[in-house]
Image (cartoon, rainbow, N blue to C red):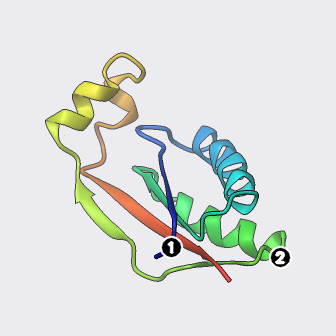
Amino acid sequence: MKQETKVDLQALRFPVASLHLNKTLDDFLNSENEKLTIITIDLSIERCIMQRIAHRSLPLVLESGSLQEPITSEHINSWCNAFDEEDYEDVSFRQHHVILKY
């Protein structure tokens, strides 16, 4: 069974989410894990993942079709001390992007 890393970017938005993506991909490449799931509310992260993989010629593939999960009051409660409501008020779901090593 493949070992998996999950990284929840919570309510981070571009460009901060993109900066976290760079470190996450580097950490994943240096790990023993074969699967990475990035959870985000930022719709631009999928494009950023594809761009990073192509630009850096990374031995990774982004699975097509991300899972969408509704944002719940639990998520919002966990974000309330770290984020302003404006950071997430215009979104209603979190995306799960799965990246695999090859």
Viewed as shown, does residue 48 lie left or right of 86?
right
First along the sequence among labels 2 and 1: 1
Residue drawn where x is 40% and y is 33% of the image = 87
Residue type, numbered disc 1: Lys
Residue drawn where x is 25% and y is 59% of the image = 69
Vertically, is 18 above or below 32? above
Of the pair 84 and 25, the residue shown nearer to us: 25
Image quadrant where one finds the C terminus: bottom right
Residue drawn where x is 51% and y is 42% of the image = 13
Viewed as shown, does residue 52 lie left or right of 24?
right
Vertically, is 98 above or below 102? above
Q: Nearer the viewer, mark 2 or mark 1?
A: 1
Farthest left residue in view:
73
Viewed as shown, does residue 62 lie left or right of 11?
right
Number of marks: 2
Farthest front residue in view:
1
Q: CA distance from mark 2 to mark 1?
A: 22 Å
Name the residue that disc number 2 marks: 57
Where residue 25 appears, as percent x and y from the top left, is 68, 57
Vertically, is 33 above or below 15? below
Where residue 98 appears, as percent x and y from the top left, is 48, 70
Residue type, numbered disc 2: Ser
In terms of secondary structure, where does tag 1 sit? loop
Name the residue that disc number 1 marks: 2
Snapshot quadrant of residue 94 = bottom left
In terms of secondary structure, where does tag 2 sit? loop
- Which of the labelled discs sits on residue 26, or is there none? none
Where residue 68 appears, as percent x and y from the top left, is 29, 64
Q: Residues within 10 Å of mark 2 (few under 14, many from 20)?
A: few
Where residue 40 appears, as percent x and y from the top left, is 43, 51
